[in-house]
Image: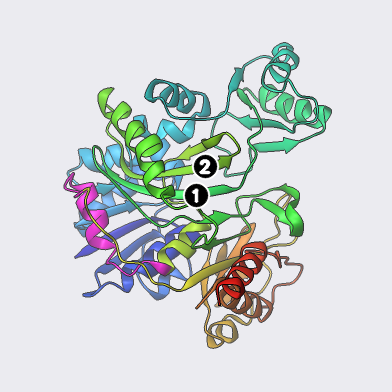
Amino acid sequence: MKILILGSGGREHAITRRLASDSPAPELHAAPGNPGIAQLATCHDVAVTDLDGQVRLADELQPDLVVIGPEAPLVAGAADRLREAGHTVFGPSAAAAVLEGSKSWAKEIMAAAGVPTAASVTVAAVEELAAGLDRVNPLADVPYVVKADGLAAGKGVVVTEDRDAAITHAEAVLTAGGQVVLEEFLDGPEVSLFCVSDGTRVVPLAPAQDFKRALDGDQGPNTGGMGAYSPLPWAPDGLVEEVLQKVARPTIAELAGRGIPFVGVLYCGLALTSRGLRVIEFNARFGDPETQVVLARLASPLAPLLLAAARGELAEETQLDWSEDSAVTVVLASAGYPVTSRSGDPITGIEDAEQLGAHVIHAGTALADATLVSAGGRVLSVVGTGADLEAARALALRATEAIGLEGSHHRSDIALRAATDEQAANEVTA
């Protein structure tokens, strides 16, 4: 099988790495790829934004499957263009990707499908902000949640108890010509669940939890994600089936009923609140960095699953096999991230990290005169696996600390609470 992966980030490297481990291994191509992906696939200099170039490349390569990684080309219609040219594509159409491209439209779909989610108000004018905040935040001691309506690379959300800070963020989005979605705050732990769909049927992957705040203790600004882990030892029994029944299948059915079949990954961002399951957001692709830990645990072949979904031939009764090991990923970010990001700093120690037993995913790297350098905010994602979360996180942290990148920072508490609770539970049952 020949597969073309579109994208250049950590998510795409994780997908490429997992596809490369299938047996037999497919012939892999990537556009544009990154230095890590280039170790596993033939990379082609076609930008993520170059939809014409992607079609030309696919016409030249004639892959059996095209996998689109990032959200921006999906929203721009990359899947439509490739399908019109006769290619088999894993990734939703532009119309279906609006589920991520517009949070207000996603709310409309959820309401029509009866999917539980946070109460919200969409605001298009500054003078509507105060009333909107009061409507979704009747209790003064509950944090405000303000989301940019469109794509924001995971950084368009502000959760704050400071009303002035909430208004400032909202005003910045509105002044730039966008809309904001004001939501009620959802208490309880968050869960990410990827659901593979062929437009009518749905197969879930394993749940994960990511960490959005930049600093330890969930402090600092929101980011695209500073780490993740899987499995979730604290998750209630039947969680995945509940998400399928209440969230994923109704959403896919609602879209299909509107003539907008969703083919690809429906990313369900969830909160397990005191009032039950609620959807925080939908994304139209694999999440980053959750993909790094979910695919690290997937024991079933990945290529046949994606191909079946792309062809509309997914078997809903598909049972995927999962490693019993735990996986933890720690993101190494560049100086200043997420407020700014510094590029061009040399990266050392990746071989040392991998000799410890971890694997390193490239997210924002480049080659400059044969030297590996930083080229983005989230530079690397270091993945450790082990018999339990404590072993996995210890390996991920040791490996992260073996890597040299001037001014970089990472969180040291990824999966800490879950690992501690897991150890305590094991001691009780021992």
Secondary element under disc 1, as helix, strand or loop, is strand
Secondary element under disc 2, as helix, strand or loop, is strand
Could you tell me the amino acid type at mark 1?
Answer: Ser
Could you tell me which residue is drawn at 66 percent across and 32 percent down?
Answer: 185
Q: Position of residue 96 (x, y in %)?
A: 35, 32
Residue 16 falls in which quadrant of the image?
bottom left
Q: Earlier in the sequence, mark 2 or mark 1?
A: 1
Which mark, residue 146? none
Quick check: marks 2 and 1 in contact, CB under 8 Å? yes
Q: How is the image coloured?
A: rainbow
Could you tell me the amino acid type at mark 2?
Answer: Leu
The segment highlighted magenta reads: 297-315
Which mark, residue 270? 2
Q: Position of residue 182 (x, y in %)?
A: 64, 25
Report the residue marked by disc 1: 192
Q: Is residue 301 visible?
A: yes
- The vertical placement of 287 against 383, above or below, is above
Q: Determine if the magenta segment contains residue 313.
A: yes
Q: Determine if the magenta segment contains residue 72.
A: no
- Residue 55 falls left or right of residue 206: left
Could you tell me which residue is drawn at 22 percent across and 41 percent down?
Answer: 83
Could you tell me which residue is drawn at 65 percent across and 28 percent down?
Answer: 184
- The vertical placement of 24 against 147, above or below, is below
Q: How many other residues sit within 10 Å of disc 2, few (<14), some (14-19) or many (≥20)? A: many
Could you tell me which residue is drawn at 20 percent across and 52 percent down?
Answer: 308
Q: Position of residue 104 (x, y in %)?
A: 52, 24
- The vertical placement of 186 against 53, above or below, is above
Residue 373 falls in which quadrant of the image?
bottom right
Q: Is residue 368 visible?
A: no
